């Protein structure tokens, strides 16, 4: 058996495939049997791979564990459709924030005051700790997370 790193040309998805031989891969690809497990595209090619050559027992590994972890955790490119959805969400969020008032770290206090009728209702955004957010939700205060980071006004250029 041989393992190939494969790349979906349509969406840029990376995955691996096991084949009896290189010829077996080529035959299956020619018949359209090799498809991307993420999007189903048959536009699949072998990705660049480093050969797995065993080192001698007395040699020190040249790859540092930190470098290997960083390479494994490197973000994969987003498919164009996902990038477009994220751009649309960011645009909607930006429009919503234009009609909202920044309250900073006073968010939980302000949201709670509006909920209980102690302050005038209005759209606000700010910062809350996870514990503060859970407390608001438990009290029935309607809140929603901001999906993309927001720069506080005093930190904006």
Image: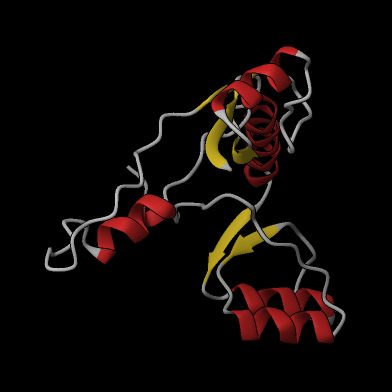
Horizontal side of 51 relative to 20 (left or right) equals left
Residue 139 percent coordinates (x, y): 84, 86
Residue at 54%, 40% in the rendered image: 2
Residue 74 percent coordinates (x, y): 42, 48
Residue 24, image quadrant: top right
Vertical position of residue 135 compared to residue 6: above or below: below
The residue closer to the viewer here, 62 or 123, is 62
The residue closer to the viewer here, 106 or 88, is 88
Residue at 35%, 47% in the rendered image: 52
Q: Residue furthest top?
A: 30
Residue 20 percent coordinates (x, y): 63, 36
Residue 78, image quadrant: top right
Whether residue 109 appears in this view of the structure is no
Horizontal side of 106 relative to 29 (left or right) equals left
Residue at 67%, 42% in the rendered image: 93
Whether residue 108 appears in this view of the structure is yes
Residue 110 percent coordinates (x, y): 67, 75
Horizontal side of 15 relative to 60 (left or right) equals right
The residue closer to the viewer here, 22 or 126, is 22
Vertical position of residue 73 compared to residue 9: above or below: below
């Amino acid at each position: 058996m041989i393992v190939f790193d494969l790349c979906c040309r349509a969406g840029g998805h990376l995955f691996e495939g096991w084949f009896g031989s290189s010829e077996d891969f080529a035959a299956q690809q020619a018949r359209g049997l090799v498809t991307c497990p993420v999007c189903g595209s048959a536009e699949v090619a072998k990705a660049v791979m480093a050969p797995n050559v065993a080192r001698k027992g007395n040699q020190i590994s040249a790859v540092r564990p930190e470098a290997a972890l960083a390479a494994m955790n490197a973000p994969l490119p987003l498919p164009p459709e996902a990038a477009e959805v994220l751009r649309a969400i960011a645009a909607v969020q930006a429009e919503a924030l234009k009609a909202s008032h920044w309250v900073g770290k006073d968010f939980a206090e302000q949201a709670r005051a509006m909920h209980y009728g102690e302050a005038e209702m209005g759209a606000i955004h700010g910062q809350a700790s996870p514990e503060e957010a859970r407390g608001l939700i438990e009290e029935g205060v309607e809140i929603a997370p901001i999906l993309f980071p927001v720069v506080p006004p005093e930190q904006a250029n």
